[in-house]
Structure formats: structure tokens, C-alpha cells
Amino acid sequence: MTTALLIIDVQQGLCEGEGRAFESDEVIARINGVSAQVRGAGWPVVFIQHESRAGYLAHGSREWQLADGLQAAAEDLRVRKTTPDAFQGTDLDALLKARGVRELIVCGMHTEFCVDTTIRRALAKGYPVTLVADAHTSAGNAVLTPRLVIEHHNATLTNISSFGPRVLAVASADLQIGV
């Protein structure tokens, strides 16, 4: 069974300034380790980039680019999206099906928006998901610290059972890739 890694919205604009995602440098390092293992197993790595029509995160802008330090390879795939759901209005599902992908590993930014929404949609489409528990992050909000957002989603997403497929939250060091 083929698995793909989805790296959601790890873009320069989310890794700098006032809205910088929590521990973004550490998260990027863990994502790089996971993506290297996924590539080594011969599985696809998919970078998903959010974009706005103009201004912040506009396609091609500096803020829209993959984050500094994030390692991409020539064979990696790219998907552009305009909503928190990486499947909505994109060719992501067709791209995965064309490669025989049946399971997903997910990491990225911002946990409570694009990571959460994409995981829920993946479950609805029948994909079991492994959430890399220490490789997704948030800037937090007025109610929850970034760490609480992350912990909340690690707990909440793994408790969703109504779709059939489930989410398993696993720390990057504990992932069993290609085994």
C-alpha cells in the first residue's frame, strides 16, 4: 500500500514576523527528517501551498515560497490551494489516486486551520492518516497557546471515528516508514 506525505503550508510568510508559527524552525527540521525517510521509501512527498489572490501569500510572492530551511527534491509534487481544505478545488485527490496512494502522513502549518481541515477531508475521502504529532504547529490564538492548539488537535483528531478511517498521532522519531 502506497503512502504519501502531505506537507501543508510550510511557507515563509508563516515562519516569520508577528504571526510566526510556534517553534517553526524545530518543526521544519522534523519535517525534513520525515520527508527524507518518505523519499527513501519511494513514496511521494507533496508540498501544499496556500495562496491568496493578492497581498500576503499571493502566488509567487516571497511569503508564498516554501519556508527557508525546508528541503524539497526535484521529484516532490506541488499543490496550490485557496481554502483550508487541500482537496477543495485542487487536483490533490486525483494526484494521489494516480500514484496508488491509500494512506497519508500529514504535517505542517497552521494546525487549527489547514492541517485540521485537510485531515478531516482526507478521512471523509477514505484515507487513513498518520499525523506527525510534533511536526505541525500554530501561532495560537486569543484563547489557546500554540502548544495547547497542537496538543488539542493531537487528541481530538485521533478520536474521530465516524468516517471509518482513523488518525494516528505519532512523534517523528517513532514513525515506521517503509517497514
Image: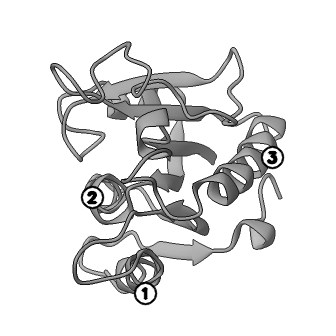
Q: Quadrant of residue 167?
A: bottom left
Of the pair 64 and 100, the residue shown nearer to us:
64
Q: CA distance from mark 1 to mark 2?
A: 16 Å
Residue 140 % position (x, y): 35, 70
Q: Which residue is mark 1?
A: 155
Between label 3 and label 2, give the one nearer the viewer.
2
Left or right of residue 80, residue 53 in this image: left
Of the pair 162 and 110, the residue shown nearer to us:
110
Of the pair 178 and 8, the residue shown nearer to us:
8
Image quarter in which the C terminus is found:
bottom right
Q: CA distance from mark 1 to mark 3?
A: 25 Å
Left or right of residue 135, residue 71 in this image: right
- In what element is the residue under mark 2? helix
Q: CA distance from mark 3 to mark 2?
A: 26 Å
Q: Amino acid at mark 3?
A: Gln
Q: Which residue is mark 3?
A: 37
Mark positioned earlier in the residue sequence (3 or 2): 3
Q: Which residue is mark 2?
A: 113
Left or right of residue 83, residue 108 in this image: right
Q: Which residue: 78% across, 73% down? A: 174
| Pointers 1 and 3 in contact (C-beta within 8 Å) | no
Residue found at the very far front of the displayed protein: 18
Colour scheme employed for the rendering of this structure: one colour
